[in-house]
């Protein structure tokens, strides 16, 4: 990391930044999400420096790699909190904004579910649900003809759940 012109000058600062971001997320961050957020915080951070620091954090058990992505361990949270005030203010502000945006996205994703299963007599059942964080707001099951159609419905529901919910309620509330 020698000869850098950004705010993050050392490997330790980069590791603290990674922990700073992960501590602010309700769920594990996917590789690409964490990479994008970290690199956006300081344009002089290099991809290879980032990957090396993340690997070090995993090997020292400050960060845990799961099937869903990366999350700070208890050790990482404690050590990160202790060191985060050493990060430059402008980097902290960018990191907080990026983490807040991803946090909102993660919360939304956790409240919208879509899956499908094959029926014993043919076709598929697509299960769609939306919650408000307390309980279900809508649950819907649809019969589809094939796997491809099921996946398309799931994808569209995940992208447009709130809009679809609004349209369904509007149609059901229409007076004839």
Image: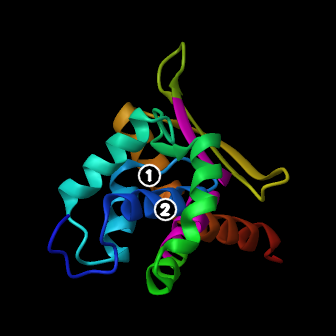
Q: How many marks?
A: 2
Q: Residues within 10 Å of mark 1 (few under 14, many from 20)?
A: some
Front-most of residues 176 and 19: 19
Q: Residues within 10 Å of mark 2 (few under 14, many from 20)?
A: few
The reply to whether residue 24 is visible in this rendering is: no
Q: Residue at x 54, y 13 (%)?
A: 120
Q: Which mark is residue 155?
A: 1
Q: Which residue is mark 2?
A: 159
Q: Is residue 38 above or below residue 50?
A: below
Quarter in which the C terminus is drawn:
bottom right
Q: Is residue 156 above or below residue 167?
A: above
Query: Left or right: where does residue 26 sit relative to residue 51?
Result: right
Could you say which quadrant of the image residue 43 lies in? bottom left
Q: Is residue 115 magenta?
A: yes
Q: Which mark is residue 164?
A: none
The reply to whether residue 88 is visible in this rendering is: yes
Determine whether label 1 and label 2 are within 8 Å by CB: yes
Quarter in which the N terminus is drawn:
bottom left
Secondary structure beneath disc 2?
A: helix
Q: Residue at x 52, y 25 (%)?
A: 117
Q: Residue at x 46, y 86 (%)?
A: 90
Could you say which quadrant of the image residue 34 lies in? bottom left
Query: Left or right: where does residue 114 sit relative to residue 55?
Result: right
Across and down, in percent, residue 164 comes to 61, 65
Q: Which residues are magenta?
A: 98-116
Across and down, in percent, residue 87 comes to 48, 74
Front-most of residues 106 and 173: 106
Front-most of residues 21 and 6: 6
3D distance between C-alphas at marks 1 and 2: 6 Å
């Amino acid at each position: 990391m020698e000869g850098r012109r950004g705010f993050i000058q050392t490997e330790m600062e980069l590791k603290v930044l990674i922990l700073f971001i992960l501590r602010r997320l309700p769920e594990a961050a996917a590789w690409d999400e964490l990479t994008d957020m970290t690199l956006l915080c300081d344009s002089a951070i290099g991809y290879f420096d980032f990957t090396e620091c993340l690997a070090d954090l995993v090997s020292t058990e400050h960060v845990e790699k799961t099937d869903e992505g990366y999350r700070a361990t208890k050790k990482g949270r404690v050590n990160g909190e202790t060191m985060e005030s050493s990060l430059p203010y402008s980097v902290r502000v960018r990191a907080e904004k990026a983490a807040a945006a991803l946090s909102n996205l993660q919360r939304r994703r956790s409240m919208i579910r879509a899956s499908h299963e094959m029926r014993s007599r043919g076709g598929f059942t697509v299960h769609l649900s939306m919650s408000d964080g307390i309980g279900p707001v809508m649950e819907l099951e649809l019969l589809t003809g094939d796997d491809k159609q099921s996946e398309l419905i799931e994808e569209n529901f995940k992208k447009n759940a709130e809009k679809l919910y609004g349209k369904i309620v509007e149609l059901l509330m229409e007076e004839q």
